[in-house]
Image (cartoon, rainbow, N blue to C red):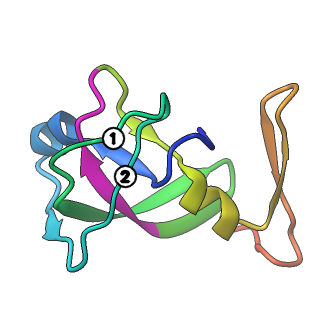
Amino acid sequence: MDSGCTHTGINKQLVKEEKIKMKPIDRLSEMFNADGTKNREVTWYILLEVKINKHKKQINIVVMNLNSTNMFLGYNWLVKQHSEVNWNIGTIQFILVLCPIVS
């Protein structure tokens, strides 16, 4: 998880290797990397089910050049989750009333 990223992104190379179907982005917007630099060539996204422990959600993820990182959970993901983040110890706790557990 990285709140410095504006959008959740997945590495373009990983998408190609795993043969994940990409869809074109209808409306382009500026997207920034965790270090604050602008990311180029952001014209595609994928729909992916993300599961963290027993919390599961299907989300749109932009396809980006992330070098050696496979995926960033960015700010757009963070604000949509009903969760409490403890930055000191690096944990996420989902609020069960708003975000039910799945098996």
36 up-or-down from 26: above or below: above
Instruction: Indicate which disc residue 102 carries.
Output: none
Q: Which of pointers 1 and 2 lies earlier in the amino acid sequence?
A: 2
Q: Position of residue 52 (x, y in %)?
A: 62, 49
- Which is more toward the observer, 83 or 39? 39
Callout 2, which amino acid?
Met
User: Which secondary structure lies at badge 2?
Assistant: loop
Q: Position of residue 37 (x, y in %)?
A: 38, 33
Q: Position of residue 61 (x, y in %)?
A: 36, 59
Q: Residues within 10 Å of mark 2 (few under 14, many from 20)?
A: many
Q: Position of residue 99 (x, y in %)?
A: 76, 73
Residue 38 appears left or right of 13: right
- Which is more toward the observer, 26 or 83? 26
State the image quarter where residue 2 is shown.
Answer: top right
Callout 1, which amino acid?
Lys
User: Is residue 64 shown in magenta?
Assistant: yes
Q: Residue at x 21, y 54 (%)?
A: 42
45 up-or-down from 84: above or below: below
User: Which secondary structure lies at badge 1?
Assistant: loop
Q: Which residue is mark 1?
A: 38
Q: Residue at x 77, y 74 (%)?
A: 100
| Range of magenta residues | 59-67
